[in-house]
Image (cartoon, rainbow, N blue to C red):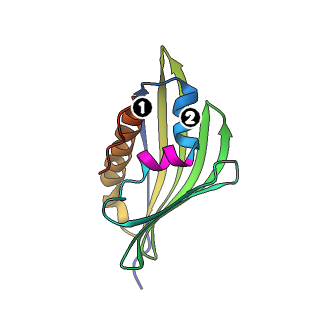
Amino acid sequence: MSERSEAHTTFVIERRLPAPPRRAFAAWSREEAKRAWSSCHNDLYDVDYGLDFRVGGTEHNRAREAGRDVFIYEARFLDIVENHRIVYAYEMRLGEKRVSVSLATVGFKAEGQGTRMIFTEQVVFLDGNTDSLEQRRIGTEEGFERLEALLAGEAAVKH
C-alpha cells in the first residue's frame, strides 16, 4: 500500500486584462473562448473538452493518448456572479490516480478600460504529489498569458 499524505497550499495570481469585466468574464463562461485559452495540450493529445457554465454545472478537460486518459481535469461551479466572481472546485488526475483537489476563486474588477483579474487557488496535493505546485503555477500562468492574448485580439497561443 502506498503512503497517504496531504500537502495544502494557496497561491494567488493577479493579471491586468486588456478588456472590460464583461469580456473577461465571457472568456471564462463561453465554451469556445474558454477552450481556446485553457486547453493547453491540444497539440500533444486528443482532447475531450466540455463546459456547462452555471451554478452546479461542470467543466472537463480530458487529454487522451492511444485510447487512454493521460490527464483529467474535472470541475464543478459552486458560485457565479456575472462579470464579478466565479468559484469552482476541481480535481486533477493522472490516469486513474487523483493527484490534487482544489478550490479556485476568480474575481473581476474594472480598472480603467481593462480588468484586474484575481485568481486564488487553495490546493491539496495528495499522496506525495507536492512537487506539482510549481508546475501548477506555471501552467496556470501560461493559460492566463493565452487569455490575455485572446482578449487583446491576438490568436491564443497553444503550448
Q: Residue 66 location in percent, x, y?
A: 36, 79
Q: Is residue 65 above or below residue 142?
A: below
Q: Residue 119 location in percent, x, y?
A: 48, 38
Name the residue at 54% across, 57% down: 90
Q: Residue 36 location in percent, x, y?
A: 43, 47
Query: What range is drawn magenta here?
Result: 31-37
Label 1: which secondary element: strand
Residue 71: in magenta span: no
Q: Residue 130 location in percent, x, y?
A: 35, 60
Quadrant of the snapshot with the N terminus = bottom left
The amino acid pointed to by label 1 is Glu
Where is mark 1, residue-wise? 14
Label 1 and label 2: CA atoms lie apart by 15 Å
Mark 1 crowd level (few <14, some 14–19, many ≥20, 10 Å Cα) = some
Q: Which mark is residue 153?
A: none
Q: Is residue 26 above or below residue 111?
A: below
Name the residue at 60% across, 44% down: 87
The amino acid pointed to by label 2 is Phe
Nearer to us: label 1 or label 2 = 2
Where is mark 2, residue-wise? 25
Depth check, front residue: 32 or 137: 32
* Contact? badges 1 and 2 (CB < 8 Å): no
